[in-house]
Amino acid sequence: MSKHYPLLVGASLAVAVLATAGCNPPGARAAVASDSSAAAKSYVPPGEKDEFYLFYSGGHSGQVYVAGLPSMRHISTIPVFAPYPATGYGFDEESKQMMGRFTWGDVHHPGLSQTGGKYDGRWLFVNDNANNRIARIDLRDFKTKQILGPIPNSSGNHGSSFVTENSEYVLVASRFSVPLPKGRYADPSAYKSEFNGMVSGIKVDPANGTMAVGWQVLTPPFNWDLGSTGKGPSSGWAFWTSYNSEMAHDTLEANSTQGERDYAAIVNWRAAEQAVKDGKATMLDGVAVLDPAKVAGVIYFLPVPKSPHGIDTDPSGRWIAASGKLQPVTSVFDFEKIQKAIAAKAFDGDVRGIPVIKYEAVIEGEIPVGLGPLHTQFDGKGNAYTSLYVESAVAKWTLPPWNAEQKKNLNSIVTDKIPVHFNIGHLVVGGSDTKEPYGKYLVAMNKLSKGRHLSVGPSQPESSQLIDITGQKMAMLYEAYTEPEPHFAQILKADAIAPIEVYPKAENQHPKAAWDATQTGVTRTGNKVEVKMVAIRSRFLPDKIEVKAGDEVTIHVTNVEQTTDMIHGLGIIEHDMNVVVDPGETKTVKFVAGKPGVYPFYCTNFCSALHQEMQGYLAVKP
Ligand code: K7E
Ligand code: CUA
């Protein structure tokens, strides 16, 4: 969601938007458990550790942030799509190559790898909405290991990153539609006939996590939005909402909000995989693409009210909750009914050969959650939590099956509501997308924080709020300010992983690694100078490098330490160069020696009492 209030909504909603401003004046403190009990519940004393990791997206900062729960303390930043001098990311050759020709990305939805429908603690996948990419972070060392993309035939990788039960795939869908293959020109006024969207299966190598584009399913030019993968009865399926089923190409604010319902996509990814194996795909820009008009059984549409944003599968895999941001209800669908409807062909016609499942045949109930519902999370105890953007609140409600009385009065299944500050987008409950959620905490990721913190001028941070969901009533525990802009997050039990603290020397495969003075050196071939360098407390070997102006200089620097937290950096004065090397790691930097002169280089990471002395000279001769 953008930060803007929807301007063109139904009259009642518009009134509500105005009214809610009064309900939550800046500084409102409703529903805080009590200051001292809330403080105790989120307090992690100095020296003690948190119970959970919180991995949250850094939006257009291009990074992923790591905090602890319940303290909400920021622990680390994992650079992914943008350079980050603090860890030297984007300066060395390896990370530069991975980032390709881009210097930023728009991180939206982190997804943890799973085995058997539970987090396995191996990888974290994140998408880049801006440059159609997806990245894999290894949780062994919290480093970005692969960036895949731009994904062919797909524009705006927003409906991403949804990991299947055994990490067979990360499933992604395009937010924007473009003429295909990419690079072809068509006027946007020919949107309906010339533009297409795409659902993609990104195949994950189970041995090492390496991603590759597996196959794609062509769709009409709807704007695919959030999704989720199935489990249990819905195993092998995936779901996305869309907006703009009107297929408008301009003034979407008005033109894409005409219809009472948009479509969710119900995708049988196992059937798609099989159809590709059976040779039913056509190659387009190097990818096997299925045209659902020709290949039946791969994708269905389901009407969802109105301009939906999120769709979430509950831990049992039977209930699918989708929210229309312009209608104050969350629709709950029964996947068993969806299967029956497909078998019985209970369709309301089709859109471009894609059958439209009858809404009435599969809807279990429309829950009156409140205004501007977006995303839903589950605690594994039969409760669902839906974020209400317009209302600035989280609604708690009871999943089906419902008794006759509850069915008659769906108001009664909304059991609690808590205000958040302000305009919540995503929310996360630990393990909500697995078969066994942790429950316990909910983190609300709010789009606006106006007036909640010391003023820092016009550029305001976002606020993320920690809510206790162990009781009948939700209780506000804590609020933290986070860099723009957390869209979604994942929570992982701290003991589910055991990250390494140094790179074992035996593992270092870098061909130019140097471990002692005898392995270091400077070699010249023509105008190319190659340096093998050791960094150790508290010196560089060699600490004098002589080159000529215009030489192409390559430095391979090995941090030979095998001690936790003994990190060295190599910053070169006036060369826009800083590389940071972890214990046991070798990194390569390349640059052209500048104007003649003597350029000091120094260690940028405070490593010892003699850190300041850890320096040398790059002497550039005329
Ligand atoms: Cu998942 Cu912000 Cu990309 Cu909703 S989006 S709020
Ligand atoms: Cu090495 Cu400071």
Image: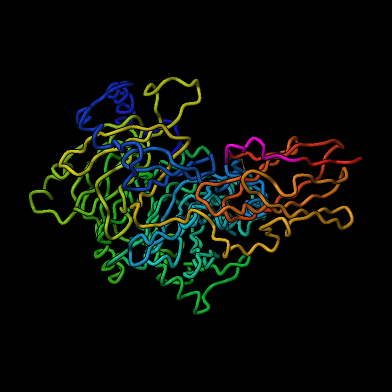
Relative horizontal placement of residue 132, taking residue 75 as reference (left or right): right
Height in image: 485 above or below 274? above
Relative horizontal placement of residue 551, taking residue 311 as reference (left or right): right
Quadrant position of the N terminus in the picture? top left
Quarter location, residue 498: bottom left
* Bounds of the magenta segment: 606-616
Q: Residue at x 62, y 54 (%)?
A: 98
Q: Which residue is drawn at 50% across and 61% down?
A: 200
Residue at far bottom of view:
278
Relative horizontal placement of residue 138, taking residue 332 as reference (left or right): right
Residue at far left of view:
405
Relative horizontal placement of residue 90, taking residue 367 as reference (left or right): right
Q: Is residue 324 visible?
A: no
Q: Residue at x 82, y 50 (%)?
A: 552
Q: Position of residue 233 (x, y in %)?
A: 27, 67
Magenta-span inclusion, residue 69 = no
Height in image: 386 above or below 240? above
Q: Can residue 613 be seen in this view?
A: yes
Residue at far right of view:
622
Q: Where is residue 542 in the image (x, y as percent from the top left)?
A: 75, 49
Quarter containing ligand 2? Answer: top right
Magenta-span inclusion, residue 612 = yes
Nearer-the-camera pick, 569 or 613: 613
